Amino acid sequence: MTDRASAAPAALKAKPGIEQAILAGPILPTILRLAGPNVFTVAVQTAVAVVETWYVGQTGIASLAALALVFPMLMLMQTTSAGAMGGGVSSSIARALGSGDVPKAQALIAHAGVIALIAGAVFSLIFLLLGPSIYRLLGGEGEVLARALAYSNLLFAGAVLVWLQNTLVSVVRGSGNMGLPTVALVGGALVQMVVGGALTLGWLGLPALGIGGIGWGLVIGAAFGIAVTVIYLMSSRSRVRLRFAGIALRWQHFRDILSVGAIACVSSLQTVLTVVILSGFVARYGTTALAGYGIGTRLEFLQIPLVFGIGAALVPAVGMNYGAGNGARAKRVAWIGALTAGAITGTIGIVVAVAPFLWAGMFTGEPAVLETAYDYLRIAGACYGFFGLGLALYFASQGSRKVLGPVLAGTLRLVIVVVGGFIVAGSDLPVSWLFAIVGVAMLAYAAFAAAAVAITKWTK
């Protein structure tokens, strides 16, 4: 009995400091320590996206419209590779390390790389072959369609690089290291911003490629991120080492990643569908209503990367505790992280619900547009806290491999938006009723996700 009692503390002391903190340290400070670099990374990437929009705006309205057509598809690729499959990769690495199986964690890297190569190739094939049909379906035609394809074809020709970058940084995050991914992704974002500006607007004597320039910027930035991460994974500083020799591909390792990542990809698809369907419903109320909705929902989009900053920390924190056989602590990590995310997004939502002009006033002075934006922020914005809570529980559940419940919560949200949207739009009710449906859907999303986590046993 004494030998067993002393074995666990001895094993814990043998682990690196961050793993000790995850497995036995104070939970909230550890989550904040892990999340800090991720939130900074997200902030930089968001700033780069804003700057790129300015670049594109300098080339004309048609380019801005083309950017709007391609953006949901780019969001789908980023969320599936980083948040969904990336979560599956981080979860599998963290669970292996939590159980003390370092060789398995190292073998999982090669399997994650194979998945990234295949998934990236699939994205390339879909959008290179079907891109024209997809963008026509979304309303693209003429010059707008031509510019959308100029951007999309470059972007998705390099889809494998984007997938590899997000997969490799997910490997490092799974070991509890959030600093190196920040170096790789922030460095890549800065490269993306400079290259994108130079090739879009023709700086330094380079050709002005228009909107296609930001496609080159993203792909080259991803290559930079891959180089930084590979160098680290092949060094002695990495907790898990990138190896090519002696690694046999095994189905059980693919299954370990896909059992989380494949299901989570459904959540990413649901998010994009929710955005597209809502935009279609609001468009029925006219261009002014759509513009106001666009201003309001832009703030909602920013909640996703913000919560991802915390969620990317929850995946390894939950995964290591789950792998170590401590499901009770894993759940405490999940709840504390989710409540933190909910408090942050809820505070943002309440502020803009009380004072919507703080956000909407930055984008337009048109009274009719502002009226719609104010309605959206007052109604849907007040429910941002529920959205943040549910989304954080989704990320935390990836660490335990018990992700189905939170994914089904996203399905419920989509169903409420679709059914409620048809009822509201078909009954000629004011657009504010549609925004109320959005708020109800967020509340239902959080309630279902919380119930799923509460009743699911987190045991190996």
Image: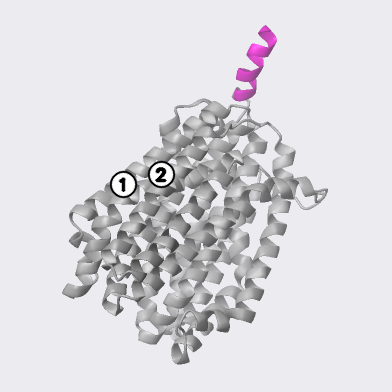
As drawn, is 202 to the left or to the right of 381?
right
Stretch of the chain drawn in magenta: 1-12
Q: Nearer the viewer, residue 169 or 377?
A: 377
As drawn, is 282 to the left or to the right of 311?
left
Q: Does residue 143 sit above or below 298 in this rendering?
A: below
Q: Nearer the viewer, residue 131 or 427?
A: 427
Q: Amino acid at mark 1?
A: Gly
Q: Residues within 10 Å of mark 1 (few under 14, many from 20)?
A: many
Q: Position of residue 31 (x, y in %)?
A: 45, 37
Residue 372 falls inside the magenta stretch: no
Q: Position of residue 345 (x, y in %)?
A: 33, 48
Q: Secondary structure at mark 2?
A: helix
The disc label shown at residue 346, or none: 1
The quadrant the C terminus occupies is top right
Q: Nearer the viewer, residue 313 or 404?
A: 404
Q: Is residue 460 visible?
A: yes
Q: Residues within 10 Å of mark 2 (few under 14, many from 20)?
A: many
Q: Earlier in the sequence, mark 2 or mark 1?
A: 1
The quadrant the N terminus occupies is top right
Residue at screen point 43% across, 65% down: 275
Q: Amino acid at mark 2?
A: Leu
The answer to the question of whether label 2 and label 1 lie on touching residues, with beta carbons closer than 8 A, is yes
Q: Position of residue 390 (x, y in %)?
A: 44, 46
Q: Position of residue 404 (x, y in %)?
A: 58, 46
Q: Does residue 362 sit above or below 198 in this rendering?
A: above
Residue at screen point 79% across, 49% down: 251
Q: Is residue 38 visible?
A: no
Residue under circle 2? 389
The disc label shown at residue 210, or none: none
Secondary structure that dominates the magenta span:
helix
Residue at screen point 54% across, 36% down: 318
Q: How is the rendered protein coloured?
A: one colour
